[in-house]
Image (cartoon, rainbow, N blue to C red):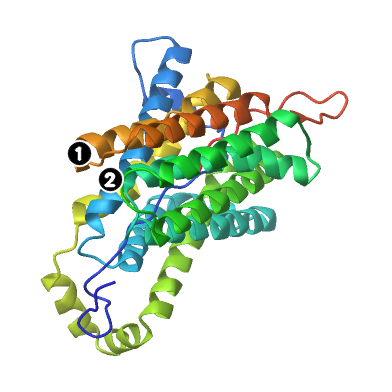
Amino acid sequence: MKASAADGLGEKAAPPARLRHPAAHAAFPWRVLVPLPVSPRLRGLLLLNLVCLACASAFVVLKESQQDVDPFVFSSLRFVIAAAMFSPFFRVALRDERIIKAGMEIGAWAAGGYLTQSIGMLTADASRGAFLSGFTVVVVPLMAGLCGTAKLKRSTWGAVVACLVGISLLEDSGAPASWGDFWSFISAVLFGAQIYRAEYWSKQLGAKHALPMLSISLLMIAGISLASLAAVHPYSVAHYLANLPELAGLLRGMQLPWLGIIYMGCGVTNGGLIMEVIALQDVSSTEAAIIYTLEPVFGGALAYCLLGERWGPSGWMGAALIVASCLAAQLLGVEKEKEEGKEDDPPAARLKS
């Protein structure tokens, strides 16, 4: 990381990753916000593909934006903007302690995923980071089985092994392996934990509390991002807080990638969440799972076209193994243990963008 004016605060900021969260059937008629002249199911499928494309583009945006800005500065600005846009739901969230508890836990897991992803993108290829993030899809059914909330099938273990083999092939192709790849992998595990806990809380609270819970999660992520910024650059933060006019002058003089920050905060994070809420009212969880496995493909394709990143044959074979293992984990990985007389729960939306 480059040093900044007082402690590295001004020069190198990093972007975060994406946010996954459960918000399936909101009480508000979200369909009216996207009046496409197509059937509800087709509209939902189109929206989910747009979400995947937006989330995949995040790797390219992060890779480019954090070349000149500190990752923690980028993340703080991104999530402060995202949380502010969800502020109308704070009042509802503060009425229920369960929503606050759920939002804080999910936000903590997601913040860990975002920060490690931002650190990873400092040195990892965007295409490699996109495919490593696919391990999240394998982590969720694995955690569900190990925690006893679902029956773990042999196919899940096969998917884990195949995914790890795919990662090893991917690491052996293209640019040399780096610590950025390691942090990208840790990010995928943390996002998997976040999705698993988000699914639990969505069932406990019900779909009508999805957006209030998301508002607390985003507030938690913004708070942790700001705290991380203060922890990494303590002297700079203390100096500028004691000299606010100097801070204002610094911000005016800095060439921050505002387009990337606003795109990540408003477009990828908030826009992705809202599109998922709309889409998952008309698309089954199985169909959504299949579409979600395309995200690494979109990410790799964008990095190939926009950043000129290239792999050898083993890299493509590894990427194909990762996608196949993700698909197998979603469709064949676990058998949910349902209680008698209860209907299936609606599909949960993601919070990873």
Q: Residue furthest right?
A: 340
Q: Name the amino acid, label 1.
A: Leu
Secondary structure at badge 2 equals helix
> Would you place residue 233 above or below residue 299 in this image?
below
Say which quarter of the image contains residue 154: top right
Mark 1 touches mark 2? (CB < 8 Å): yes
> Would you place residue 71 above or below residue 269 in this image?
below
Say which quarter of the image contains residue 240: bottom left
The mark found on residue 306 in the picture is 1
Residue 278 or residue 7, whichever sits in front: 7
Q: Which residue is mark 2?
A: 60
> Would you place residue 137 above or below residue 188 in this image?
above
Identity of the residue drawn at 62% across and 50% down: 193
Residue 266 or residue 302, whichever sits in front: 302
Q: Is residue 341 left or right of residue 30?
A: right
Looking at the picture, how far across and down is residue 350, in whole percent?
Answer: 52, 39
Q: Name the amino acid, label 2.
A: Val
> Would you place residue 195 above or below residue 74 in this image?
above
Report, in whole angstroms, how far the alpha carbon at label 1 lies from the one at label 2. 8 Å
Identity of the residue drawn at 28% across and 83% down: 7
Q: Residues within 10 Å of mark 2 (few under 14, many from 20)?
A: many
Looking at the picture, how far across and down is residue 140, in whole percent?
Answer: 63, 41
Looking at the picture, how far across and down is residue 60, in whole percent?
Answer: 28, 45
Identity of the residue drawn at 45% across and 39% down: 273
Q: Is residue 285 left or right of residue 67?
A: right
Q: Residues within 10 Å of mark 1 (few under 14, many from 20)?
A: few
Secondary structure at badge 1 equals helix
The mark found on residue 326 in the picture is none
Total marks placed? 2
